[in-house]
Image (cartoon, rainbow, N blue to C red):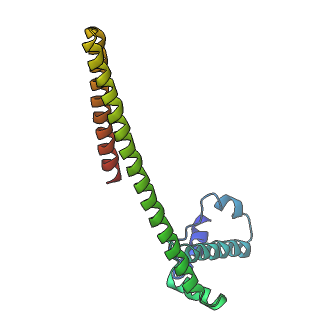
Amino acid sequence: MAEELQNDIDDSKELIPEVKIPEELVPVIKDLPKKKQQEIVKAIVSVSIKKQLSSFKGPLPPPEVISGYNDVVRNGGERIFSMAENQSNHRIKLEDFVIREELKLSGRGQIFGFIIGLIGLGLATGLALLGHETLAGIFGTSTILGMVTVFVIGKKAQEKDISEKE
């Protein structure tokens, strides 16, 4: 039974070569009359053809579809290209804006980190001059270790981001 159905499909191979009858369908239609089986097979082929003809990848449809839009809407193809170009320009501007803002934030973070580091080292120096060497050592050491850790971790995270994007 499945072979007969597949033979009916094979007869239509010049239209669509990859059509295979689903195995789940065979038990459902095996008791139907031959004419009904053929109608179902033709419907499967028809749906497969429509599906293959109407699908495409990429931002723009194939030229045949674009010319079809020209038949339906005046300058339809040109409008589709214009829409794709506008979307591309918008995405480029958005990415440019995001990159500029990230650079600004990074620069501000470095400036504020430098200021906080100077305050910490100044506080450690002041404490040392007032005779609180232990407390000055704790402040100075923690400030320097904190700054080094932030810069090392930040550099490793930046390298990781760059390697992931490549």
The one nearer the camera, 81 or 39, is 81
Instruction: Give the side of residue 13 with respect to residue 44, left or right.
Output: left
Which quarter of the image is occupied by the N terminus?
Answer: bottom right
Compare residues 140 and 76 and report the one nearer the observer.
140
- Any part of residue 58 in sight: no
Residue 83: quarter of image = bottom right
In the image, is residue 68 above or below residue 118?
A: below
Q: Is residue 110 left or right of residue 56?
A: left
143 relative to 7 in the view: left or right: left
Residue drawn 47% across and 71% down? 89
> What is the x, y in percent for residue 51?
59, 72
Quarter of the rendering containing residue 120: top left
Number of numbered discs present?
A: 0
Compare residues 92 and 137 and report the one nearer the observer: 137
- 106 relative to 89, above or below: above
Residue positioned 35% across, 52% down in the render: 165
User: x, y percentage for residue 16?
Assistant: 53, 77
Quadrant that contains the C terminus: bottom left
Residue that appears at 55% across and 72% down: 55
In the rendered image, the residue lying farthest to the front is: 130
Residue 123, x across and y down, in percent: 32, 21
Q: Is residue 52 above or below residue 138?
A: below
Residue 48: percent from the left, percent from the top?
A: 59, 72
Q: Is residue 84 visible?
A: yes
Depth check, front residue: 132 or 31: 132
Task: Note whether 26 is above or below 64 in the view shown.
Answer: above
